[in-house]
Amino acid sequence: MSTNPPPGAERSHRARPRKDRRQALIDAAIELLAEGNSADISAAAISRRAGVAHGLLFYYFTDKQGLVAAALADVLANLAEFQEPEAGEQSVRARVEGFVRRHIEFLERHRVLYVRVIREGELGDSVVEDAVRKARAEGAQQVAALAELSEPLSALQSAAISGWTGFLDRTADAYFDTADLELDAVVELIVDTFEAVVAATHSPPETGNRDQ
């Protein structure tokens, strides 16, 4: 009788550094989520894909929702890094345009995961909302710094830029869903809107006198 271990068993039980095992579970969850609605995303399937013992998922994350939250945080942390300005983007306008373009490109690159987890909220509204809220807050801080807005932002500026980050994602959705939209035009629209929002927060008392 063969004494060979079942496929994956040796890999599952081989000693790994704790950080590697935790990250392996996160990476496996991201991969399975990105494979589409037909992919098995049970705790057992994630553990198999990660090549670690099933119980480690619950050790590191308590439950699958905790793992999903960690996976989203991992992806969204990469988004913040991806949005950083490039060397040639010297003006404020160029930096904000680069931020917007890379934001949309990142969402497009992770399209299946974005639709499944964020737009459709398949894996739990509270988990998704918390992760997206944190990412948008960080994105708002990032774009405010790129625009060289003075810190601390006023309450009006914070509210306006927070609202603009929602507009950015909804307009990205429209771009993905509408074949006739060109990326350059979408980026220009979003940046024009950002500039208008920021300008409006500088002189709110004069908004009623624009025609004078």
Image (tube, rainbow, N blue to C red):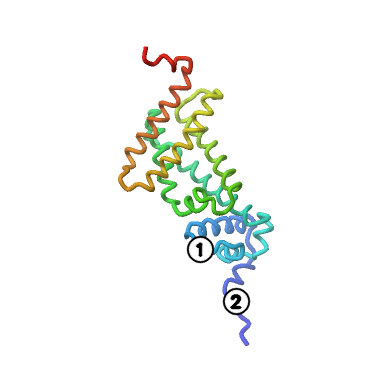
Taking the image as shown, residue 189 lies to the left or right of residue 24, namely left
Kindly identify the residue that appears in the image at 47 percent across and 33 percent down: 164
Report crowding for label 2: few under 14, some 14 to 19, many 20 or more residues within 10 A (C-alpha).
few
Residue 193, horizontal then vertical, whole percent: 40, 30
Task: Identify the amino acid type marked 2.
Answer: Pro
Split into 4 quadrants, where in the image is the N terminus? bottom right
Q: Residue at x 68, y 63 (%)?
A: 55
- Per the image, label 2 sits on a secondary structure element best described as loop
Q: Position of residue 60 (x, y in %)?
A: 66, 55
Q: Which residue is mark 2?
A: 6
Front position among marks 2 and 1: 1
Q: Quadrant of residue 44?
A: bottom right
- Image quadrant in which you'd find residue 26: bottom right
Q: CA distance from mark 2 to mark 1?
A: 22 Å
Figure label count: 2
Q: Residue at x 54, y 64 (%)?
A: 40
Return the residue found at the far top: 212
Residue at figure coordinates x 61%, y 80% from the top left? 4
Q: What's the mark number on residue 39?
A: 1
Place residue 112 in its image quadrant: bottom left
- Label 1: few (<14), some or many (≥20) within 10 Å? few
131 vs 95: above or below: below
The image quadrant where one finds the C terminus is top left
